[in-house]
Image (cartoon, rainbow, N blue to C red):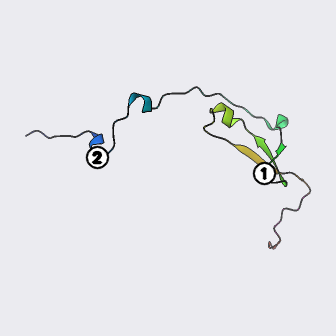
Amino acid sequence: MAIRTTPPYSLGAKPRREAETMTPKKQKFMVKHSDNAEWTPGLRSDFEYCDLGIKDATDGKFDAHIIRIADKDADITPANTRI
């Protein structure tokens, strides 16, 4: 007696067409050093943002930023915190 096996797409998934398969895309290598980082104002005036260049390196698929407090002398302790 032969055991009949069915392909995985018989459960509802369809086989991928050639254009839908994952193809390697060219991505860039990115290094960002803190000593030459460019900090810019962003959505909130209390913070500065540093773009890591991930968006350009991944052709827009991902994005990453570092966020820091703009005023180094600001009191960042929440009012309801007990020390």
Identify the disc placed on residue 11.
Answer: 2
Secondary structure of the residue carrying numbered label 1: loop
The residue at 22%/40% (across/down) is: 6
Report the magenta stretch's main SS. Answer: loop
Query: Which amino acid type is shown beneath numbered disc 2?
Result: Leu
Q: How many marks?
A: 2
Residue 52 in view, yes or no: yes
The foreground one among 16 and 24 is 16
Q: Is residue 21 visible?
A: no
Q: Which residues are magenta?
A: 74-78
Q: Residue at x 26, y 39 (%)?
A: 7
Q: Residue furthest left?
A: 1
The residue most toward the right is 73
In the rendered image, the vertical position of residue 13 relative to residue 22, given as above or below: below
Task: Give coordinates of residue 30: x percent, y percent.
Answer: 69, 31
77 in relation to 34, above or below: below
Q: Residue at x 46, y 32 (%)?
A: 22
Picture quarter with the C terminus: bottom right
In the displayed structure, 19 sits above or below 34; it is: above
Please state if 58 lies on the left or on the right of 53 as rendered: left
Q: Secondary structure at mark 2?
A: helix
Quarter that holds the N terminus: top left
Which residue has dot 1 on it? 43
- Identify which residue, 74 or 26, lies in the foreground: 26
Q: Is residue 33 left or right of residue 62?
A: right
Q: Is residue 76 magenta?
A: yes
Q: Is residue 34 magenta?
A: no
User: Pointers 1 and 2 in contact (CB under 8 A)?
Assistant: no
- The residue sitting at 75% across, 45% down in the picture is 66
